[in-house]
């Protein structure tokens, strides 16, 4: 679900992303976590996040997965980084390609 007005409200906000990779039996086999600022959001590119290193990562253009973050610090399991006071969070499940 993509709504242009709601997507526009996300631009510039800090987000934490969690992606769990699952095998064909839907068992978790890996995790990826990152954070950054949302720099673009549109139906063609999806939700585009710029990480602190300057990389751009895109998520599907489905805004239903984006939620307000609870105040406080978040420790990213896959990187060990601690992120304070993010504005948004999103989680995704990615099926394995094999």
Image (tube, rainbow, N blue to C red):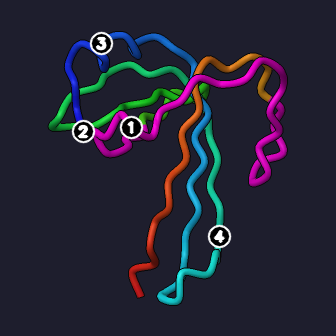
- The residue where tag 1 is placed is 64
Pointers 2 and 1 in contact (C-beta within 8 Å): yes
Residue 78 on image: x %, y %:
75, 54
- The magenta span reads 57-82
Coordinates of residue 64 in the picture (x, y in percent): 39, 37
Q: Which residue is mark 4?
A: 30
Task: Report the residue at 77% width, 27% height from top.
Answer: 83
Real-space CA distance between mark 2 and mark 3, rounded to the nearest whole angstrom = 14 Å
Q: Quadrant of the N terminus?
A: top left
Relative placement, left or right, of 48 versus 66 is left
Residue found 50% across the figure and 61% down from its top? 93
- Residue with the mark numbered 3: 8
Q: CA distance from mark 4 to mark 1?
A: 23 Å
- Name which of mark 2 and mark 1 comes first in the sequence: 2
Q: Up-down: is 14 above or below 63?
A: above
Residue 7: quadrant of the picture: top left
Mark in the foreground, 2 or 4: 2
Q: CA distance from mark 2 to mark 4?
A: 26 Å
Q: CA distance from mark 2 to mark 1?
A: 7 Å
Q: Disc 3 on helix, strand or loop?
A: helix
Question: Depth-wise, is mark 4 or mark 1 nearer the camera?
Answer: 1
Provide the residue designation for mark 2: 1
Q: Quadrant of residue 69?
A: top right
Residue beneath the point at 31% across and 40% down? 62
Helix, strand or loop status at disc 1: helix
How many residues crowd around disc 3 within 10 Å: few (fewer than 14), some, or many (20 or more)? some
> Which class describes the residues within 10 Å of circle 4: few (<14), some (14-19), or many (20+)?
few
Q: Is residue 47 above or below residue 77?
A: above
């Amino acid at each position: 679900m993509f709504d242009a007005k709601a997507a526009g409200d996300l631009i510039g906000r800090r987000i934490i992303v969690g992606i769990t990779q699952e095998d064909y039996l839907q068992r978790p086999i890996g995790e990826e976590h990152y954070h950054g600022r949302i720099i673009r959001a549109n139906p063609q590119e999806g939700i585009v996040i710029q990480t602190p290193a300057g990389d751009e990562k895109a998520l599907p253009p489905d805004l239903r997965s984006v939620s307000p973050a609870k105040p406080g610090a978040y420790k990213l399991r896959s990187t060990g980084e601690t992120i304070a006071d993010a504005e948004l969070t999103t989680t995704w499940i990615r099926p394995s390609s094999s």
